[in-house]
Image: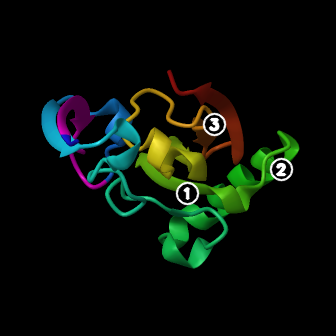
Amino acid sequence: MRRVLVMTCCLPISAMAACSRAANPVLLSLEAESASELRCPFRTPESVGAFAVNDPDKFPSQYREALAAVALELRRDGEDPTEYIAAIDGGHDQLTFHLWHTTAFLPENACSIGNPGGRCVDFVYDTKTRAVVAKLGWQ
């Protein structure tokens, strides 16, 4: 027997905006047997404007040095950079790498907000010191 499930998902504000930090959540009413049958249609690597950390050619050339530092920091933290995709915000002095772990895109995490999958993090890269200067866990 099918029933209507109501859940909250969010639309990215822009191609670079992470769904978990979007300012405009929307209430969806979908017909399904269970929540596990549903897949949030808004969260894909493409929808969050992110590319694989281990594919530097997808990023503009001015970010590649910073991306290499981010990948090194992930390894130092015991993480596998091939399991992350990144979207980049920032300007001249600092770049923020919004790092989505692949678990954020699993069906059971598809409509989670905050830190879907529990392994997403932001790394702040200082362009003057050429180093990662902060690691911020998503909440």
Magenta-tinted stretch: 3-15
Q: Residue at x 14, y 32 (%)?
A: 26
Of marks 3 and 2, the one in the foreground: 3
Q: Which residue is mark 3?
A: 119
Residue 12 lies in magenta, yes or no?
yes
Specify whether 74 is left or right of 15: right
Of marks 3 and 1, the one in the foreground: 3
* Depicted 115 relative to depicted 101: above or below: above
Q: Earlier in the sequence, mark 3 or mark 1?
A: 1
Amino acid carrying label 2: it is Arg
Q: Which residue is mark 1?
A: 85
Quarter of the image for residue 137 reads top right
Q: Are marks 1 and 2 in contact (CB under 8 Å)?
A: no
The residues tagged by marks 1 and 2 sit, at their Cα atoms, a distance apart of 14 Å
Amino acid carrying label 1: it is Ile
Q: Residue at x 66, y 62 (%)?
A: 65
Q: How many marks?
A: 3
Q: Residue at x 29, y 42 (%)?
A: 33
Quarter of the image for residue 71 reads bottom right
Residue 75 is labelled as: 2
- Mark 2 Cα within 10 Å, few/some/many (few <14, many 20+)? few
Secondary structure at badge 1 equals strand
Residue 99 is labelled as: none
Q: Position of residue 25 (x, y in %)?
A: 19, 30
